[in-house]
Image (spheres, helix red, strand yellow):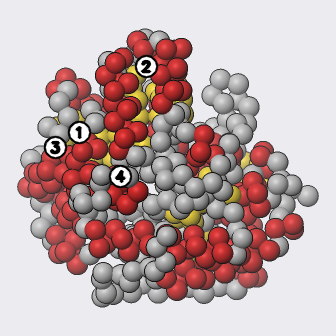
Amino acid sequence: MKQDYVAPPYRIKMVEPIKITTRGQRVKFLKEAGYNPFSLRSEDVYIDLLTDSGTGAMSHHQWAALMQGDEAYAGSRSFYKLEKTVKEITGYNYFIPAHQGRGAEQVVLPQLVTQEKRYFISNMHFDTTRAHVELAGARAIDCVVEACFDTATYHPFKGNFNLDKLTQLIEEKGAKHIAGIIMTITNNSAGGQPVSYKNMQAVRKIADKYNLKIIIDGARYAENAYFIKQREKGFTNMSIREIAKKTFDLGDIFLMSAKKDGLSNIGGLIVIKADETLYNQCRTYIVPMEGFPTYGGLTGRDMEALAVGLNEALDENYMQHRLDQVRFLGDKLQAAGVPIQHPVGGHAVFVDCKKIAPHIPFNEFPAQAVTNAVYIEAGIRPVEIGSFLLGRDPDTNENLESPLELMRLTIPRRTYTYKHLDVVAKAVIAVYKNRNNLTGLTFEYEPPVLRHFTARLKPKK
Ligand code: F0G
């Protein structure tokens, strides 16, 4: 087990002041926000760990690139620069930009659904991916290894597909009814957990046997490649760029929220290996949804910054520090006995709130209760990944019970210091010690889709 944590391979050139608040203020802010941290004003947050999506710091190379943005509506020079980068990294033939990951999803996923093809199988669907599958009239089935749900036991690749179950599901639903296999790397919903190369290779074999398409949902593909390098036999001497390329060789379509491993504040990618018909369909469909196919909702300067960021995320010194920051926070929490998804994943520490608040039932959202307490404690904003996020069954409208009730402490890229993470650890440990006083929550307002973003809650009396 590695003990030390590397120092950042960058220095600070510009700072953004953040506000210190009092406990009394935070109690009031949270009440006004309907006990849902998504509704807090960010200026009332001291350390914002809501997401690693679009919240990272750009490099001076990226800021310089912004100045070169070509804002032409059609055929922008910046598009061609981004296209070249994307094709070099993936080895795929066709590229269309989108404004972010869900923009890519809304364009591509409906093209794969027909009357007959109405199921997607994934190791785990991210929530917007699930939403777009359902909006397209299909159903999303998760098929991850059981180890993923056992937060206490070490497994190097908790994002892996359960291969037996995958075959079984395809047989059961009938291959002709499967619209595609979605490989989410890393597996965000279970803790930023990686998927091994060997597992992905086996999924490819199964896909070939049944003539199915593989869609790589690769928001954090570079982090996944680094875990493969660290944990999987035979990859130690390969660069993460080479490992990523081998990963892309296993897929047919690559959808990316470039707000993560694109090291940019906005952006999405639709990349298609060889299916020209699908590419042409997406090019047609993207116009009314996102914009003309050479900008897809992005400005020229966004595309410039992204072209630089995609390469920076494949720098191994950057990546080592990034993952060490996450490991640092995880180690601190574990040393104090706080139950977390072990080992920690790539972009966040996931705290197991089912174990912290077993007295709160799933439909009173134990992880949301812990999340809110951490905000009150020190102005830190984590996010719930549990039954509150999971929502209701689209067929029965019953509240779904998530197998895990997690609080995600998501680390933005190149943004906070180890000392900030010390503050986070201290706050979470304080909440953990007071865990018996946590109470559940009920709805004051519940929107019909993606409820966790805008719902209002109140504490259960
Ligand atoms: N796929 C994965 C695996 C994601 O983690 C996300 C976003 C998306 C797709 C959608 O991309 O946000 O650019 O539209 N995850 C963010 C998060 C929101 O906080 O984990 P997007």
**Does residue 36 appear to the left or right of 280 in the view shown?**
right
Which of 71/86 is in front? 86
Secondary structure of the residue carrying tag 2 is strand
First reached walking from the N terminus: tag 2 or tag 4:
2
Q: Position of residue 132 (x, y in %)?
A: 46, 34
In the picture, the quarter occupied by the C terminus is: bottom right
Q: Residue 91, labelled with which disc?
A: 3
Question: Which label sits in the foreground, 4 or 1?
Answer: 4
> Which residue type carries mark 2?
Ile
Name the residue beneath numbered marker 1.
Answer: 249
In the picture, the disc for residue 178 is: 2
Q: Earlier in the sequence, mark 2 or mark 1?
A: 2
**What is the distance, in whole Å, between disc 2 and disc 4 at their CAs?**
32 Å
Compute the Cα span from label 2 to label 1. Answer: 21 Å
Question: CA–CA distance between discs 4 and 1?
Answer: 19 Å
In 3D space, how far apart are the residues under numbered discs 3 and 2 (Cα atoms)? 26 Å
Q: Nearer the viewer, mark 2 or mark 1?
A: 1
Q: Residue at x 45, y 60 (%)?
A: 346
Residues tagged 1 and 3 counted as in contact (Cβ below 8 A): yes
Q: Quadrant of residue 428?
A: bottom right
Q: What is the residue that sits farthest to the front in this orientation?
A: 233
> Dot 4 corresponds to which residue?
233
Q: Which of the two labelled residues, at mark 3 and mark 2, occupies the earlier sequence position?
A: 3
Closer to us: 31 or 245: 245
